[in-house]
């Protein structure tokens, strides 16, 4: 502004000098008139620029700062620079804000920003779906009007946000959320929601599993300790003692089988995925399986092997042998004497299927989806009688999943069952691809058919 003042004073001084010269030449009146006209023109010039300035200030459109003449040229140039700086800072701020919002949106957890009165200021898409919110319509509303679960309302009102609270999601059956409020800034709050359904399920499974294992082991243990007490307390004749000892041996065998199966499952869980380099020679494996089936049956069943030649499997031989062995032993165990157990192997370049079909007791449809759960049995007594642990099919399912294979079960009570393991193309290989002997050593059996 100094610049403007200086230039105005210089202009007035020049007008005054010119007026003096005109006064000396044409008389005082002419001098005064010309001075007044000069000052009026200067005034008009300033008023015009002030008017432009005021009009721009009323609607300061970026990039539209007016042009000025004379001293005003400098004034508007300064204004222009200032306005450009402002626009740049504004754009930078807007970009930063947009990036923050994008980050908030991309966050896998739900994020809600609440003001001091717990009104919703902003939330991301995950929070919308977790808490059934809609930012378009719900912005400015108290969060407790929209998320009404009593435990959540109590949590918000408690003002104690040291720990999260667990709630069922308003929408989405069975979804469990962990919600925590984090106060920040000027009495504002960040509400975070996390989907912990899977964790909850795992926790329930862990609890059930421990309860099941304890129960499964407690029964034979109770029997064992009962017999021990009897032998200790009573004087038994040698035959009775031998009978008791045999029964005790049976119970401890049962516990051993349960522990072995649990160890097998835990080995499978921690082992790396089966490789695609190891060839499982299916033909000899099936021959061994048939021999095992006949031994297990003790001549009480007709065992049939119906195998196509030409394709082998890629994977862990001990695991495949264990899975096939379990399916076979189940068929023998759940098929009354005189029935038939058929082992089939069908393979092409696209897929391979190993199936065990029996003419046994069959399974009612409601049990089929649960058969691969640990310790699930249709008939506990029958499973126990035949030496079952309730873990065989869980092991089979685990092994097949590790080989990207599926287990299909079809059954009809009283008629029989068919258990089929289906392998995808990547696990199937023509018998001739790898030369004999290049398949590596034969692995030990993981869980033998019992
Ligand atoms: P288990 O050791 O009790 O046999 P599994 O996990 O191998 O345990 O099988 C689970 C249950 O599935 C068995 O208890 C039995 O009720 C049923 N099952 C399995 N295979 C057959 C089959 N071939 N025929 C009828 N029921 C079967």
Image (cartoon, grey):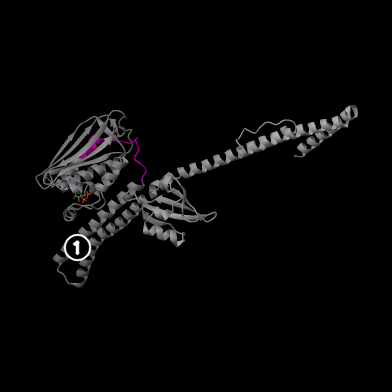
Residue 323, image x, y percentages? 25, 43
The residue lying toward the viewer, choosing from 375 and 333, is: 375
Mark 1: C-beta under 8 Å from nearest atom of ligand 1: no
Most distant residue in the left direction: 338
Most distant residue in the right direction: 24
Element under label 1?
Answer: helix
Say which residue appears at 21% left-offset and 61% top-offset.
248
**Quadrant containing the N terminus in the rendered view:** top right
Q: Which residue is mark 1?
A: 245
Q: Is residue 284 magenta?
A: yes
Say which residue appears at 21% left-offset and 44% top-offset.
327
> Is residue 445 in view from this perspective?
no
Does 108 sit above or below residue 4?
below
The residue lying toward the viewer, choosing from 286 and 415, is: 415
> Is residue 137 in view from this perspective?
yes
The residue lying toward the viewer, choosing from 54 and 284, is: 54
Judge from the rendering whether residue 296 lies leftward or rightward of residue 64; answer left or right. left
Residue 332, image x, y percentages? 16, 46
Residue 69, image x, y percentages? 72, 30
Say which residue appears at 78% left-offset and 35% top-offset.
8
Q: Which residues make up the magenta segment?
A: 271-288
Q: Is residue 24 magenta?
A: no
Query: How many residues crowd mark 1 within 10 Å: few (<14), some (14–19), many (20+)?
Result: some
Q: How many marks?
A: 1
Does 35 sit above or below residue 390?
above
**Occupied quadrant, residue 359:** top left
**Occupied quadrant, residue 397:** top left
């Amino acid at each position: 502004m100094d610049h403007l003042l200086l230039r105005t004073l210089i202009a007035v001084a020049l007008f005054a000098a010119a007026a003096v010269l005109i006064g000396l030449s044409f008389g005082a009146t002419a001098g005064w008139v010309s001075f007044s006209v000069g000052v009026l023109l200067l005034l008009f010039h300033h008023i015009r620029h002030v008017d432009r300035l005021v009009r721009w200030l009323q609607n300061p459109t970026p990039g539209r700062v007016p042009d000025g003449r004379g001293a005003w040229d400098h004034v508007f140039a300064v204004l222009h620079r200032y306005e450009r700086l402002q626009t740049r800072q504004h754009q930078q701020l807007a970009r930063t804000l947009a990036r923050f919002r994008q980050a908030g949106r991309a966050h896998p957890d739900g994020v809600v920003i609440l003001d001091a009165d717990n009104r919703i200021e902003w939330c991301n898409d995950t929070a919308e779906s977790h808490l059934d919110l809609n930012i378009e319509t719900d912005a400015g509303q108290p969060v407790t009007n929209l998320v009404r679960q009593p435990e959540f309302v109590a949590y918000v009102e408690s003002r104690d946000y040291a720990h999260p609270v667990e709630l069922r999601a308003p929408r989405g059956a069975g979804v469990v959320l962990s919600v925590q409020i984090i106060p920040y800034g000027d009495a504002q709050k960040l509400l975070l929601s996390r989907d912990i359904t899977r964790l909850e399920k795992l926790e329930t499974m862990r609890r059930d599993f421990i309860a099941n294992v304890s129960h499964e082991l407690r029964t034979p243990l109770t029997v064992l300790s009962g017999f021990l007490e009897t032998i200790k307390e009573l004087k038994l004749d040698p035959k009775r003692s031998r009978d008791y000892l045999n029964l005790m041996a049976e119970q401890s065998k049962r516990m051993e089988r349960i522990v072995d199966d649990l160890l097998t499952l835990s080995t499978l869980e921690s082992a790396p995925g089966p490789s695609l380099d190891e060839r499982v020679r299916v033909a000899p494996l099936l021959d061994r399986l048939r021999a095992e089936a006949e031994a297990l049956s003790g001549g009480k069943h007709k065992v049939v092997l119906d195998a196509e030649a030409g394709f082998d499997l890629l994977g862990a031989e001990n695991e495949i042998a264990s899975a096939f062995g379990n399916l076979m032993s189940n068929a023998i165990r759940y098929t009354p004497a005189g029935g038939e157990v058929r082992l089939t192997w069908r393979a092409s370049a696209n897929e391979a299927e190993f199936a065990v079909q029996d003419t046994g007791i069959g399974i009612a449809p409601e049990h089929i989806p649960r058969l691969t759960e640990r310790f699930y049995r249709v008939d506990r007594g029958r499973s126990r009688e035949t030496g079952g642990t309730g873990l065989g099919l869980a092991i089979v399912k685990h092994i097949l999943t590790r080989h990207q294979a599926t287990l299909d079960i079809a059954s009809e009570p009283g008629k029989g069952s068919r258990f089929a393991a289906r392998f995808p193309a990547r696990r199937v290989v023509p018998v001739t691809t790898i030369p004999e002997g290049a398949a590596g050593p034969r692995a030990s059996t993981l869980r033998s058919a019992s």
